[in-house]
Amino acid sequence: MEFRCSTASLAELPCDGLALGLFSSTWQEQLRPWAEQLGQPLLELLEKRQFKGKPGELVSLQLPGLQPSLLLLAGLGEPENFDGVALRLGAAQLAKASSGQGCSQLALALPLEGFAPASAAAALVQGVRLALFQDQRFRSEPEPRQLPSSTWLLGLSEELGAEVLRNQAICAGVELARELVAAPPNVVNSLSLEATARTLAKDYQLELSVLDEEDCRQRGMGAFLAVAQGASVPPRFLHLVIRPEGPIRRRLVLIGKGLTFDSGGYNLKVGGSQIELMKFDMGGCGAVLGAARSLAELKPAGVEIHVISATTENMVSAEAIHPGSIVTASNGKTIEINNTDAEGRLTLADALVYASALKPDAIVDLATLTGACVVALGDEIAGLWSPNDALADQLKDAARQAGESLWRMPLQASYKEGLKSHFADMKNTGPRPGGSITGALFLQEFVDAAIPWAHLDIAGPVWSEKGRGIDPAGATGFGVRTLVEWCCQA
Ligand code: BES
Ligand code: MN
Ligand code: ZN
């Protein structure tokens, strides 16, 4: 899919399709110049169709013999509510409506007043490309699809070409994350994730260190290895580095939970616990590898980026960890594993210790950590925990720019009580109420308190059952856009 920015008039462009976004209060005025250019009674045609301009409303008109011969109109609701998310959504709806209509050059005209040109370009490119993304890798006969080969972004000057390329790189990262997360657990495992990291390292000349089980043992990663000991595929601890040319201002670490399948272990997941979806438990790893894909191309100046994931699967076997076992993490802290299904935090514990030793300026981890976070925030919003207000604000800003939703949650220190163990320094699981908070508090025990750190629980937005907004059904690639934005703003 190619994008072109253009401020030319419709008559000067080779477009066979025109897609317009119209507000409910002003659609008649917005439509008038287009009706004049096309010489068609568009207002009457739309009134006949009882068009109101409500969000989600869509009308498709064929104009045989004219150029363009296809006209798509989407309602955008009230202009007051028209933010970056709504702009992405409008672009997405129009792009989807253009599919299968025989249109090859689509002109897209949405109201861009009030948007910075770069934000408008980002929303349009992301809205179109990410909404049209389809994953047919696992079908024996892919459905043929007929999509426009070019989309012309009307009202954006040609100087925004660089911005278009930037957003193509961001979309490529989101798509990599979606493909990794959607792939079944018999395809994506710790060894295939290593291979993905190796491909990224080779394609973009990144530095890659891979620790195998023995390396992890030597580093004392008893928490990660406790999870991995029941796996049928050997664990891999992945560490990619994206180094800029020239002097380094900031060093950032991105950590992703990398459970390629989470059966729960001996605390086996039961009916209704979505065990068949637990291939998405490497959504954090998918997001950081996706972000690495984008950032390796964007190479933000002065920022060194470390991407880390402790990858394995949480399985039941004779070798699997027993509930009640006590293990020692790489910072020497002992953990009573009172629930083998709270495995993500065990793998992250050793990853956070490893990351702290790099003495970075900030650490952000992403994890499908708790069902409790889904109960709290639903499937559109990720939870954000951080003891550092500045970092929390940066991430909220980045998410807003990226069109992703984060909500800050409390690191309620008194809830640490729930993690007290009679036998070890702590348990891995607290009481059910506030379960996503005790999850975050557990992680905090493994971070050097001098380093700004944030934890994103993406258990809800990693997956969309029916598809929503610019996300098709299934894996969303959540987190990539926020991470890229945050690293580029650093
Ligand atoms: N991967 C799950 C979290 C999860 C559950 C994500 C449902 C998305 C949907 C995680 O490893 C887990 O099992 N968490 C437990 C923690 C509990 C044992 C403290 C949970 O949420 O039930
Ligand atoms: Mn689990
Ligand atoms: Zn899990």
Image: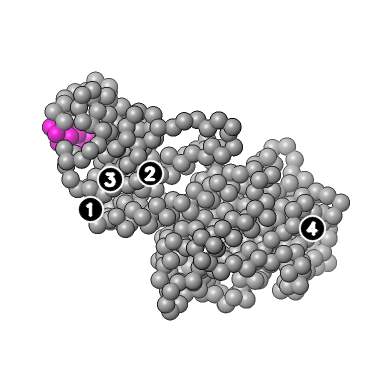
Q: Which residues are magenta?
A: 27-37
**Residue at coordinates 51% horizontally, 66% vertically from top-left?**
205
Mark 1 to mark 4 CA distance (whole Å): 56 Å
Residues at badges 1 and 2 in contact (C-beta under 8 Å)?
no
Left or right: 61 in relation to 205: left
Q: Which residue is mark 1?
A: 157
Of residues 378 and 483, the one drawn nearer to the viewer in this rendering: 483
Q: Which residue is mark 3?
A: 153
Camera-nearest label, 4 or 2: 2
> How dense is the environment of label 2, judged by Cα within 10 Å: few (below 14), some, or many (20 and up)?
few
Q: Which residue is mark 4?
A: 229
Camera-nearest label, 1 or 2: 2
Q: How would you classify the magenta stretch by its main secondary structure?
A: helix
Mark 2 to mark 3 CA distance (whole Å): 13 Å
Badge 2 element: loop
Residues at badges 2 and 3 in contact (C-beta under 8 Å)?
no
